[in-house]
Image (tube, rainbow, N blue to C red):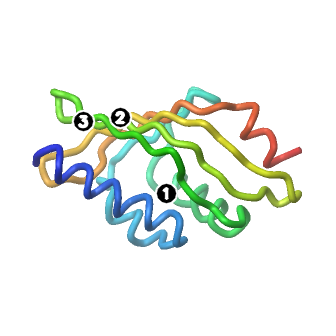
Amino acid sequence: MNATEHLAILDHFFAAIQAGDIETVKATYHPDAEIWHNNDNAVQGVADNLRTLSWVSQNIAGISYDDVKRTPMDDGKVVQQHVLRGTAPNGKPLNVVACIVFTFDDGGRITRLEEYLDSAQVAVITS
């Protein structure tokens, strides 16, 4: 797959998250995909990540991905920077600056997602 196809997959992926369409998100992942976050340095499997995204879609009002910048890399990976915006369950505004490195298989499914995010903003969700 080429960079244009990878970017289209990411358009589809993030639109599904915003819509709370967890089944479409699941279909975008390879079944053995690994999802890593800098704030806990742990690797999630697909099932755990889908539970997290389901919670986000049900509890964060007005979720959007803004200021999106994507850079295809020579090795087939794509780097995305964005700001996740919404309203936390406690009514506080959420503005999480993030950078994600995506790795894809030959069929275009995400095999690894490495997410670097502002943990101080994530704390807004639980405070």
- 114 or 87, which is in the foreground? 87
Q: What residue is pinned by disc 2?
A: 79
* Vertical relation: 27 (above or below) 85: below
Residue 71 vs residue 37, the one in the foreground: 71
What amino acid type should be assigned to the residue bearing mark 3?
Pro
- Classed neighbour count for the residue bearing mark 2: other residues with Cα under 10 Å, few (<14), some (14–19), many (≥20): some
Q: In the rendered structure, which amino acid carries the disc numbered 1?
A: Ala
Give the percent coordinates (x, y) of residue 68.
Answer: 45, 45
Q: Quadrant of the C terminus?
A: top right
Between disc 3 and disc 1, the foreground one is: 3
- The residues bearing labels 2 and 1 have C-alpha atoms spaced at a distance of 23 Å
Q: CA distance from mark 3 to mark 2?
A: 6 Å
Callout 3: SS: strand
Q: Would you name the residue on which mark 3 appears?
A: 72
In percent of width and height, residue 106 lies at 12, 47
- Identify the element where label 1 is drawn: helix
Secondary element at image label 2: strand
Q: Which mark is residue 47?
A: 1
Marks 3 and 1, how far apart at CA: 27 Å
